[in-house]
Amino acid sequence: MRLTKSVLLLGGITSRLPEVFGWGAAGHEIVATIAQIHMDPTVYPVLCDILNYTSSNPREPLCHLAPIASWADRFRYRMGWSGPLHYVGAVDDYPSQTCAFPGNGGWAGERRRNVLGAVRNFTDILEAYISEGSVGRDTANEAAKFLVHFLGDLHMPLHLTGRDRGGNDDKVKFGGRTTSTFASMYLPESLGRRIIIDLHAVWDGLLIAKAIRETPYNYTMPLPSPQIEWALRGAIYDPYIRRIMWEGILDQWKDEVSSWITCPQPRFSSSSGGGFWQTVMRMFSRNVGGETDDEVLCPYHWAQPIHELNCDVVWPRELDQPPYKNVSLSKVARYGREDDDCHHDDHDDEHDLDIAGGGPYLQLDTPEYAGAIKERLVVEKLLAQAGIRLAAVLNWLLAEIVEDGRTSGLRLVQLQNLGAEFRG
């Protein structure tokens, strides 16, 4: 395939770029840090042994989840089998017109080879390691890193739809033009104006980057909570995490948090009847989440309202209307990856940007789109839910067994509801 001079130039530039543009990684690290805040202290010795790292610094946790939160993305192309585990898509799903999860057509792809099955399977592997010792530590190590990542992916709405590869094929603008900060900093002006992004990139990182930039200054100061501050690592997103904790988990959503880690009870309990009859009834009553969900861990149940956001706020209706309809990345020169009509792409730095042609492109950094998402704290709530659920699952798996043990279900280490004097 012949590459244009512009594409070759761009490839040379991106190969020398610093890693500060990895906002997709930032989202996963934020989820991991929120989980860290809510983990039981007895989790650390077991978790750090599994991760094969223990810090000797008494001012920080024995080990931290954030550095391994994007491991599954970094090594994705060495582990090609893991690609479909980052997402799930339904045959009948076509937001914003139709949101089916999964609808009569069922899931696309192989059975259980998706993010719902991945959360279930890697949780089961860790449970087997802890309870039975039937898997080795190396296997548990990878299972833990996959679980941390996939619980994050589960809470990104575009990882729950297969339309246009989760929005990877839908060109949009975000900001004053089609370039990102990345492009305007590193590319010539004549080339920079021709760089476009896609809808998936907006949700994978640009909305988070915008929120981090716009976090009020008072959140650069420590919160009056050692439990929160101990989990922070001096990252650029620390103020953003403080805001999510202070305004969201400890305030706006405080009465919801416990419901985030609950699962529906099975329709037929063990007292419903004899073994054969009970089995038959379960076969007929099983819902679509039956393969992945139980009364403790329920990725399908958790994902349902997240998927509904695709029709509610994520997928702009204008993309299905003139003049933006059919403006797709499939008609644009690409670099650094092969086209794949079936699979999502998680964005490396150079993969977020393509050489633009044609247009026009829908502007999403507007009060009607990005402003409405910001006003509703949509992204912040998704990050919070992911972190809370990750902490609860790790507590259930790894914390010291006390009282009624794991039969008590998922649980969190609670934070005291601090006063409002810090809010500005």
Image (cartoon, grey):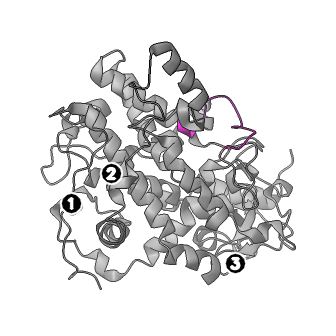
Main secondary-structure element of the magenta-colored stretch: loop
- Single out the mark in the foreground, 2 or 1: 1
Residue beneath disc 2: 35
Distance, label 3 to label 2, CA atoms, is 36 Å
Question: Going 63% across and 69% down the picture, which residue do you hit?
Answer: 183
Q: Position of residue 119 (x, y in %)?
A: 48, 37
| Mark 2–mark 1 CB contact (< 8 Å) | no
Measured as percent of width and height from the top left, residue 219 is found at 30, 76
Vertical side of 220 occupied by 81: above or below: above
Q: Residue furthest front?
A: 273
Q: CA distance from mark 2 to mark 1?
A: 12 Å
Q: Against 225, is 2 above or below?
A: above
Residue type marked 3:
Arg
Residue 408 makes an appearance in the image: yes
Which secondary structure, mark 1? loop
* Residue interval drawn in magenta: 102-116
Residue under label 3, please give it: 177
Disc on res. 415 = 1
Foreground: 198 or 334?
198
SS state under label 3? loop
Type of amino acid under label 2: Ala
Mark sitting earlier along the chain (3/2)? 2
